[in-house]
Image: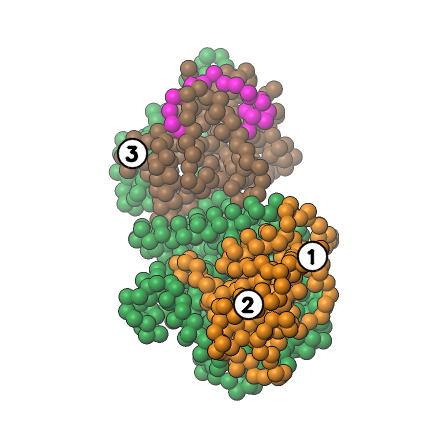
Chain colours: A orange, B brown, C green
Amino acid sequence: MESRAKILQALSKKFTDSPAPLPEVKVFPPVAGEPVDKFEFILRGIGGRTVRVNSYSEINDFIAKEYTSNARIISLVKEVSGSAITPDIDPHTFENVDLVILQPHFGVAENGAAWITSDRMGDRALPFISQHIALVITTDSILHNMHEAYDRIGNTNQPFGTFIAGPSKTADIEQSLVLGAHGPKSMTVFLLSVNR
Amino acid sequence: MKVALFVPCYVDQFYPQVAIATLELLEKLGVDVAYPESQTCCGQPMANSGFEHLTHGCNDNFVKNFSGYDYIVCPSGSCTLHVKDHLHATDEKAAASIRSKVYELVEFLTDILKVEELTSSFQYKVGLHQSCHGQRGLKISQMSELVSAPFSKTEKLLHMVKGLELIKLSRTDECCGFGGTFCVAEEAVSVKMGIDRVADHVAHGATYITGNDMSCLMHLEGILRRQQSPVKVIHIAEILNAAQ
Amino acid sequence: MEQKIYDHAVLADKFNKDASRVDWHDKTLWFIREKRDKAAWQIAEWEELRETASQVKNNVLDNLHDYLLEFEKQAQQNGVTVHWAANAEEHNRIVHAIIKEHGVSDIVKSKSMLTEECHLNEYLQQQGITVVDTDLGERIVQLAGEPPSHIVLPCIHWKKEEIGELFHQHLGTPKGNADPQFLTAAAREHLRQRFMTSRVAITGVNFAVAETGEVVVCTNEGNADLGVQLAEVHIACMGIEKIIPQRKHLGIFLRLLARSATGQPVTTYSSHFRKPRPGQAMHIVLVDNGRSERLQQESFRNALKCIRCGACMNTCPVYRRSGGHSYQYAIAGPIGSILAPGLDMKQHADLPFASTLCGSCSNVCPVKINIHEQLYEWRQVLVKSGHVSPVKKAGISGMAAVLERPGIYKFSGAVGRWFMKYIPVLVNNKLNPWYKQREMPAVPRQSFNEWYRQNRKQNGKQS
């Protein structure tokens, strides 16, 4: 612990007579238009897919058309079909999961990201190890920007949370965009309309 | 209004026509221009090389020559910026006064003289090289990095010149690679930057490359002449002073 | 560290021997700068965001002591073990000790510029531990035995054909296949095996929130997450300046980071690691390595605001035309050139001179670091500390002596021009780096000063 004391002592020296105050974080006016439209536009631009649906059964139909019955599908959304997971299972066993279906808390229009915490992941590895990922977001839970996002997150205390914006990707080889670097090769967001 | 003409050392030695054009242009616009004859240099060549501590004598000479004027006008953004940011002297009060009164030619024309029309004529396709110190340092024009409304004091003046056609460039404000002693210390990169800058102007059909700084233009001219290109460089003062 | 043999100018000269490759490198990076511009212009409040981010970071630097303590307390409450390392060696020892404690010999690591700065990979390899970099770009340069050439785009200097050949040799892909899609799929297979078997995962840290004790790690590939979630131990390594006060400040920084870096609206994953997963151990290593000392230096302290987006590199006309390796430091480009001399002035004395001081870096920077002004300041410090060649010193001193004496200046100007005009071989030779690829300016008959005295003074106009 010698270094701790040493570093803290070095940092306790006064650098300035007038330390910079913490600025107020302004509330920036949201961009005009429906956030859900913007979300859809942005997410498609970064390699995601959006599907507008009116009911959970439409989601089930959609998935049934894309995946054979042999596919290993895990669903953490109770209205969407798929197997559940047993608690305390070794995450390495998810290696052969074809599709995971999750329900994030909300989406963010300005960047196409969705916020999801570990309590909604089943296992923290699932959103990353699955070959494909699908998210169900209701159209009334799309926020305008990241400031609104952190307002909404507030001081919730989840062990782990992440913004996911599209499929895993890389452009490390000559700036050619390739979807499916290490994580999911595709991301589908079902935008579930709600009557307001 | 008492205005002193500050002529960069390399302009004095190699491009006297630029200083002559500046002088004539200012006089045409009704300014009474004095030329302090014992001036030498702003000290930037030393300071940018890390030898600011050796510029005291040079700075004192600068202060001696340029004290007591309402404005000091210089046909170089780079030298002007250096004086504005780094002129310190034995007589610090006089130095501070000079720092607040020194203007690059274009900004003096647009901001102080508020020139709205010119009688000059220049019937060529011209590419504008935005020298970094004038652009980003003195804010003579908006830089492409910022999300802010565009403006250009230099272009505003060029648009007043009869017959002049200003070409568009692929990269509006990329550095030419002169950079003071950088041009010899980092010869390979400096030259490559210059070659690329020249190519952008040539590709867009420039007959002349102009700018607010003869140092950048000297570097580009060196490359153009080595390429035996018909494209020429010309300081903005020469264009603005070009007779009808 | 060994004293380097070549300085930036020499390596840049070497890089420029292949002009078409320089063009390719320049255009690739400029393309990213353009994507950044496009993304920034989507945000009307972009400049306000930069200003706010800058102010938050200023506040952090002025209160780092308190924020670190708050962060430590929160992290410990979250069940995380917090370590403090005064320097690179201690950081490496701490990381090694954790790995040893778990009896592991193969580990995965996602991108961390701090571990590059500390040369962690080399250290661990000397201790018999195999480190696999899991970011695709980093894996490519690792296979090639090179350091990254860019902090965000580690193998931006590699062509796809060369990567195809590298993968053919190391991963057994078919010779001649240089399709990025194919090569990425091959790397995915190769690295999946590593993810599945590694019990320790190291990550860097983009932001550490004092208020919550959580660390935020941003990737596009998902490699940090995959590594951490499949491992028994997560070690997050961070410089002490990565702290931000509150969660809500992430809103500002995450809006700026990816847009500045690559023009993306946000990275694919922005993961907030607060508590270890059940059964997992989580460690955070806080590293000083010269940072507390840097904070004392008024002129240079705000370089610590850097969020490692790489925008200054993409915009830098010198970086684009000299390549990352010419800087010989983990962080290349403008920001590296002001960080490196702070760690070792002698070793990195060349870097502050590898710039034209054009100022593009300072204006593209999302946290408004005055990079080009610091480059200028470093030049003054380096020269005063004697890190300058005697030839240059003599030359500049001579120049200063002339320029402070108007009489001598006029005389030597006239003499100089006379020589250039009548004995050009004295100037136009291969020893003159100007003349190598550029013509000298044509020599006028007289200087302006001479013209003025002849034409104006005699006409009665007096200065």
Chain of the residue on which disc 1 is drawn? A
Which residue is pictured at 33% across the width and 55% down the height?
C14
Quarter the N terminus of chain C occupies: bottom left
Which residue is pictured at 34% across the width and 24% down the height?
C445
Image coords of residue B40 (percent x, y): 48, 32
* Tag shown at residue A61: 2
Mark 1, residues whose alpha carbon is within 10 Å: few (<14), some, or many (≥20)? few
Residue C109: in magenta span: no
Image coords of residue A116 (percent x, y): 63, 67
Tell me which amino acid carries mark 3.
Ser
Tell me which amino acid carries mark 2.
Asp
Q: Nearer the viewer, residue C38 or B111?
A: C38
Q: Closer to the N terminus: mark 1 or mark 2?
A: 2
Asked if labels 3 and 2 share a chain, the reply is no
Image coords of residue C178 (percent x, y): 33, 64
What is the spatial separation of the Cα atoms under label 1 and label 2, in whole angstroms?
A: 21 Å
Image coords of residue B221 (percent x, y): 35, 34
Q: Is residue B239 above or below residue C282?
A: above
Chain of the residue on which disc 2 is drawn? A
Mark 2, residues whose alpha carbon is within 10 Å: few (<14), some, or many (≥20)? few
Where disc 2 sits, the SS reads helix
Tell me which amino acid carries mark 1.
Asn
Q: Is residue A31 above or below residue B68?
A: below
Chain of the residue on which disc 3 is drawn? B
What is the spatial separation of the Cα atoms under label 1 and label 3, in whole angstroms?
A: 69 Å
Where disc 3 sits, the SS reads loop
Which residue, given by chain and number where applicable, does mark 3 sit on?
B229
Q: Are marks 1 and 3 in contact (CB under 8 Å)?
A: no
Q: Is residue C322 left or right of residue C270?
A: left
Which residue is pictured at 53% across the width and 35% down the height?
B141
Which residue is pictured at 59% across the width and 55% down the height?
A39
Magenta-highlighted residues: B105-126
